[in-house]
Image (tube, helix red, strand yellow):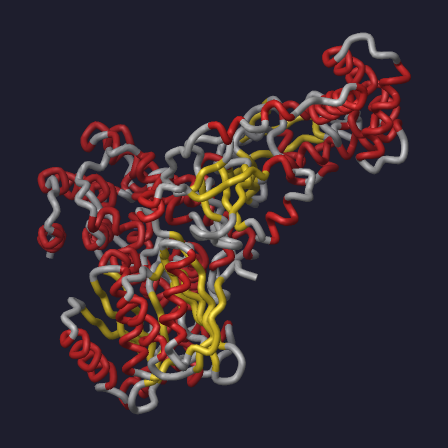
Amino acid sequence: MPADTARLFSLLEESGKKYDNEKIQRAFLFAEKSHCGQFRKSGEEYIYHPLAVAEICAELNLDTDAICAALLHDIVEDCPGASLDLIGENFGGDVRILVDGLTKLVAIPFEDKEEEHIENLRKMFLAMSRDIRVILIKLCDRLHNMRTLSSHQEEKQRLIALETMHVYAPLAHRLGIQTIKQELESLALQYLDPIGYEEIRGWVETKYGENRHFIETVQTAVGEKLKSLNIPYSIQGRIKSIYSIYRKMYRSSKSFDEIYDFYAVRVIVDSEMTCYAVLGLIHEMYHSMPGRFKDYISTPKPNNYRSLHTTVIGKTGVPFEVQIRTAEMHQVAEYGIAAHWKYKSGTKSDESINKKLEWIHMLLESDQKSMDSEEYLMPLKIDIFEDEIFVFTPKGDVVTLPTGSCGIDFAYAIHSGVGNKMVGIRINGAIAPITTVLQTGQIVEVLTSSASKGPSRDWLKIVKSGEAKNKIRGWYKKEKREENIQLAMTEVDKEFEKIRKGLPDSEKERIMTAIAQRHGLESLQDLYNSIGYGGIALSKIHVKIRDEIERTLANQAPASLEVTQSHAEKKEQKKSKSGVIIEGLENCQVKFAKCCSPLPGDEIIGYITRGYGVSVHKFRCPHAVAGLQSPEKDRWVNASWSKNASEIQSNSYNAVLQLLVADNIGVMAAISTALADMRIPIAAINTQSSAENTSLLTITVGTKGRDHLNSIIERLKRNRDILQILVGGDK
Ligand code: MN
């Protein structure tokens, strides 16, 4: 039976999105013609593969161009006569870019190497793709290849499965595409450890068989409760995936019985506030397992996953996990970056690549500290697209360098000995100047000679990487002390002339000696040596000389500072959105320090930060107390709350409460109900089991100020299960 596009088009239609069906049909016919006479390992006509890939892309609701590119993805590689230019002419520039990206990715070699190499591969993968759709199509391509892996030879199966596990599944995870990630992992595991896979599959079947109706019972009970309270919801049940169990058992060496989230129900509601309310209800219905609560809403996972997780124990003693999230959070949880296509109606694909990069930045931006300990991914730098390039050594190792790096940077990245002795480079086999700026994907070879006299000082101005700079300076520090000192003395003299002409040599020497002492250097010679090899920047010395001269002058004539003081007082109350007035600064950005969370009513002080306006601390915050005694004391400025009550009222100020509570069923529910009654927004909750039978609850709430907070605390204190309440930042 010949391949046809019926299923593809019905998938596209189901999406409800607009597609250019004519263009897609043309792409299919083009691919069918190009692949004509080619067969896959399974004996099937080749066209079935790109068609299947396009269907998976359609399930993710990728756009018209991506579907076309999926249909055409193997053509340039496999079909003589079908060029990129031809694709561009027929299907436009965007499809051409996508197919080009997909073709390039094929060239990245994969070998079973150490983790660092694999991480570099993942990065390179992302960097070379440029357009995020390339990666998405590639993931769909890999998924189909994995589904049909059985027709390959065993050796090949293992390598492809390994690559899937190490490169593709983590990429899918990082992009948040849970559905693809899970299927890739499950398929790869079947080839990498068929015995382990079968063993767990057997357990899962038995366990599930024993509690066949368990999940449905829970779903019904929770559903009825929500219905009775008129909370709109949807609810789903799931069993943990075989690979997740495998990982827990083999990597975290847990036993099968220690897997508490084998069963899970997922409650989807309409708002973040409702999530916390439902959490309270769940804890009212079931006994919660201490220490198993996770608030990924206030602290999202690195791939932007957001949800509340808690583990509770069912009526029959079976533990299960409850995940609570909004519909939007759920979309991101299932489809990650692909949710952009699936749920935003953007049909225009050329919205600008930047928009898409913003997305990936957002998803990759990771607070590494918030990563689960079981998260097996290495952190990925956010700025890979602009800031890093990836080049190969002739042996195929990937070297990561800052963008703009040249051959010299590369040589020093290999080894300082290679850099110090380099005389030339070859890029992709051709001799090139060592200062040539490198591009991602190039193969670079360094030519060295023992006759080399070492690095040139000019290189310091050319290289981009800190590593190369340090190594070149290191060489100068060791090899060229005399030269460094002479050079530095001339340079420093020029600086003196710029700052103040005609200072006597004795005065210059006094100043330089003082600077040397301040740097902890034993002699003036050492200081000059450091300046000479670049260990201390000349610009810093310039500033220090100026300071030193000013200080000398100030000592001679005491300054009158009084005059400027009352300037701020004269100005009347100023407008301020944050409700805070910073003396001497109008309309500045204000943020509240997390260390002490000041509230209206507290005595406060401001700190002028280097990047983000003024950060406001409590006057007694240890940071403020220490800061006022540090050399930075000038950055601390007077601050006060606005006298204008409406400015305060229109804001909500976060306060952090720490509650020591008895591990009692219902305490969570009581707290969330009390807060909801008072209409206090909850920004985050975290629990931690504490001493015996108690838990420590950290809740961030929005308040109108100190008095308001006190009334909240009074209300909470009425609950006898709350043993103690502390306000974060109060001492
Ligand atoms: Mn393919």
Q: Is residue 526 above or below residue 61?
A: above
Image vertical order of residue 174 relative to residue 374, above or below: above
x and y percentages locating residue 85 in the rendered image: 27, 28
Compared across the picture, whether 97 is left or right of 611 comes to: left
The percent coordinates of residue 173 (x first, y second) are 38, 57
For the question of whether residue 275 can be seen, the reply is: yes
Location of the N terminus (image quadrant)? bottom left
Q: Which of 106 and 671 is in front in this view?
A: 671
Q: How many labels does the image show?
A: 0
Pick the front one: 100 or 465: 465
State the image quarter where residue 665 is shown.
Answer: bottom left
User: Which of the two residues, 416 or 212, is positioned nearer the viewer here?
Assistant: 212
For residue 441, say whether it is visible: no
Q: Which residue is drawn at 65% across and 34% down?
A: 411
> Quadrant of residue 318 in the image?
bottom left
What residue lies at 83% left-to-right and 12% top-to-bottom?
A: 503
Tell me which residue sits at (26%, 71%) in the image.
Answer: 278
Q: Which one is nearer the viewer's eye here, 355 or 107?
A: 355
- Where's residue 483, x and y in %? 85, 21
Q: Report the side of 468 relative to 82 (left or right).
A: right
Q: Is residue 534 above or below residue 662?
A: above
Quarter in which the C terminus is drawn = bottom right
Query: What is the x, y in percent for residue 538?
Result: 72, 23
